Amino acid sequence: MPVNILITFIIGSILGWIVIQFTRPPTHLRGLILGCCAAGNLGNLLLIIIPAVCKEKGSPFGNSGACYTYGLAYASLSMAIGAIYLWSYVYNIVRISSRSSKDTGGKDFSISKSSRESSISDLGNRTEPLLSSKEFGVTEDDIDHYALPRTLSEGKAEVAVADHLGIKQRFAMLFKKLNLKSLFAPSTIGALVGFAIGIVPQIRKSLIGDEAPLRVIQDTASLLGEGAIPTLTLIIGGNLLKGLKGSGMQKSIILGIVLARYIALPLTGMLIVKGAIRLGFVHSDPLYQFVLLLQFALPPAMNIGTITQLFGAGESECSVIMLWTYALASISLTFWSTFFMWLVV
């Protein structure tokens, strides 16, 4: 599952890059587009869809009790892994994109290739001297005295050294730009704590179970977790309400993100998961395969809106994107959930 979620981020980033190449958005929106195409809402929707499918009468996944238990575990694991990827990858992409747009002042200083070639050709065609030797009485013996020093070979060596050092400097700058503190966001810390409790048997037996001495901690965490789902729903509604006001963004950007998340990504994920099953990397559990497939068909993560608010880059545009993607999510998720259930059962 961690590899599968990582693949969704990688393929989504590639699709986002394609959307950027076709739509040519402003600099401050490029990180937002990559994040919306890469990160899906793994937590909230999986915690709603999986229990609903398992508790339905005549569920294709068998016993409702076992289906709910395993489905909730799969959904929780997806949410934890997705939070780590989101705050380590999308957070830094949006941050770097917002910084680059602020550094350039929102302007595009790129020069077209034709203008550069024409300038170079004009300079190459000019052969007239800047100063005439006849006007200033310079003899042939004094030419070497007045000639400018030629450092062509030295310039080439300096450029080679600069290129060689540039590779190391780029890696150093990349690690400096990555904010490793964002990896320890509250959701990431919660995921790591959950992994530690589940892996260490002594801690698990003392916290989880009816006979656990510290089961009050589990009951408290469960109570808070149940309240988090409607809270996230309210946050989604608040962010979508901003999208109703509009922001005048390009319709092609919204269309590109919708096509990437709801058509290209699920089709690609279906090929990847079926190929992994064919090669024996995934065991023959229909519910587990359904969860893996569904991870490719989810709308963008709502935490992307929080990230854009942190850096003040593309807040209104993010609200519009979320409005349209979540408005179409009901149709897309209904279709892909039905198709994936038919595919795995």
Image (cartoon, helix red, strand yellow):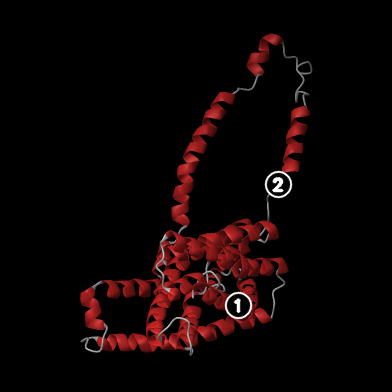
Residue carrying label 2: 111
Residue 121, percent from left and from top: 76, 33
Taking the spot 49% from the left edge, 86% from the top edge, the residue there is: 52
Indicate the amino acid at tag 1.
Answer: Phe
Residue carrying label 1: 335
Residue nearest the viewer, comparing 287 with 320 = 287
Residue nearest the viewer, comparing 291 with 196 = 291
Residue nearest the viewer, comparing 315 with 330 = 330
- Which of marks 1 and 2 precedes in the sequence? 2
Horizontal side of residue 313 vs 202, given as left or right: right
Question: Which quadrant: the N terminus?
Answer: bottom left
Q: Is residue 251 above or below residue 159?
A: below
Quadrant of the rendered image containing residue 242: bottom right
Residue 188, percent from left and from top: 39, 71
> Which secondary structure lies at badge 2?
loop
Quadrant of the rendered image containing residue 105: bottom right
Q: Residues within 10 Å of mark 2 (few under 14, many from 20)?
A: few
The answer, for residue 302, to whether it is visible in the render is no
Indicate the amino acid at tag 2.
Answer: Ile
C-alpha distance separating marks 2 and 1: 46 Å
The answer, for residue 234, to whether it is visible in the render is yes
Horizontal side of residue 91 vs 196, given as left or right: right
Residue 63, percent from left and from top: 40, 85
Residue 225, percent from left and from top: 40, 85
Taking the spot 39% from the left edge, 67% from the top edge, the residue there is: 283
